[in-house]
Image (cartoon, rainbow, N blue to C red):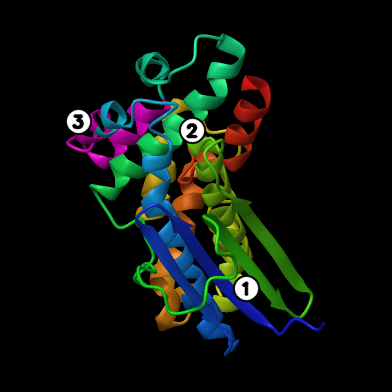
């Protein structure tokens, strides 16, 4: 049976029910749809982490850091002191396993801190309604795409034995897929943005203000059409943080490693 070209996201879990399917696969349409998916999953990831870390405590820490100047906040989030504060906020005593959760907690801290100072989400609205027939009657999270050579299936079937952190892992993995594919469909000059920050290699603490100053001078219209300038700006923020050694997105791999070793 031939599967039609499409991009689809559906979720059914408790009170969270949402779903949409895109069949008009013009590049701009796909880019907007993917951005909506990213906003949807990023909005929900924190609540699926509450079983493995003190999310409320991390949000409180983010609130305090957000009162700092942009540069000071980023420097603080990179500091060993923040690692010492995040350690007690994850629910794991095994040091070898705990480091994976601390990585996730730091990513959550970065995103939550910066979201209080600037826009870190795409301009599209998240998917909140159900406008497609669910592909499965069971509780699930499902993201599928087929367009040319791009074929992806990311899915988890949820029952009473499913760890909530495993759902967070899949949501983070969906976001990573979107992060990789969206620039192609949006026509964002990724190589140009990478080159903009190309002078920075292994960034030391003293160089963090220089990276952020470079970001402040980033002109998104030079790297994307007007419709996707904000998307390019978020890509540039992600790249600047990457140079510094901080994540803007929850790392699915860290959650995967934690779940593997915690079993």
Residue 18: x percent and y percent? 42, 67
Q: Earlier in the sequence, mark 3 or mark 1?
A: 3
Residue 173: x percent and y percent? 59, 50
Q: Provide the secondary structure element on which disc 1 rests.
A: helix
State which quarter of the image contains the N terminus: bottom right
Horizontal arrangement in the rendering, residue 50 relative to residue 99 (left or right): left
Horizontal arrangement in the rendering, residue 57 relative to residue 213 (left or right): left
Q: Report which residue position mark 2 lands on.
A: 104
Residue 218 in sight from this viewpoint: no
**Label placed on residue 64:** 3
Q: Earlier in the sequence, mark 1 or mark 2?
A: 2
Is residue 30 highlighted in magenta?
no
Q: Report which residue position mark 1 lands on.
A: 184
Which region shows up in magenta?
Answer: 60-78
Horizontal arrangement in the rendering, residue 12 relative to residue 202 (left or right): left
Frontmost residue, 171 versus 213: 171
Task: Name which quarter of the figure residue 17 lies in.
Answer: bottom left
Residue 212 in sight from this viewpoint: yes
Residue 197: x percent and y percent? 54, 52
Query: How far apart in space, not on screen, are marks 3 and 1 (Cα)?
Result: 37 Å
State which quarter of the image contains the C terminus: top right
**Label placed on residue 47:** none
């Amino acid at each position: 049976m031939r599967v039609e070209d499409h991009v689809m996201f559906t979720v059914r879990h408790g009170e969270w029910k949402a779903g949409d399917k895109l069949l008009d696969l013009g590049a701009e349409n796909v880019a907007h749809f993917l951005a909506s998916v990213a906003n949807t999953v990023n909005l929900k990831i924190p609540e699926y982490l509450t079983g493995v870390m003190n999310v409320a405590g991390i949000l409180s820490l983010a609130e305090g850091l957000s009162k700092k100047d942009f540069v000071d906040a980023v420097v603080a989030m990179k500091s060993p002191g923040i690692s010492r504060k995040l350690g007690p906020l994850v629910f794991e005593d095994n040091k070898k396993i705990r480091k994976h959760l601390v990585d996730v907690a730091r990513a959550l801290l970065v995103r939550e801190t910066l979201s209080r100072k600037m826009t870190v989400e795409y301009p599209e609205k998240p998917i909140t309604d159900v406008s497609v027939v669910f592909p499965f009657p069971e509780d699930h999270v499902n993201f599928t795409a087929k367009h040319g050579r791009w074929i992806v299936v990311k899915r988890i079937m949820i029952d009473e034995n499913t760890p909530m952190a495993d759902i967070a892992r899949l949501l983070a993995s969906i976001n990573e897929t979107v992060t990789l594919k969206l620039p192609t469909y949006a026509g964002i000059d990724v190589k140009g943005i990478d080159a903009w920050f190309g002078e920075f290699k292994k960034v030391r603490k003293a160089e963090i203000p220089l990276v952020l100053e470079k970001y402040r001078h980033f002109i998104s219209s030079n790297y994307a059409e007007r419709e996707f300038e904000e998307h390019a700006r978020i890509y540039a923020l992600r790249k600047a943080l990457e140079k510094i050694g901080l994540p803007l997105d929850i790392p699915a791999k860290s959650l995967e490693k934690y779940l593997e070793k915690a079993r």
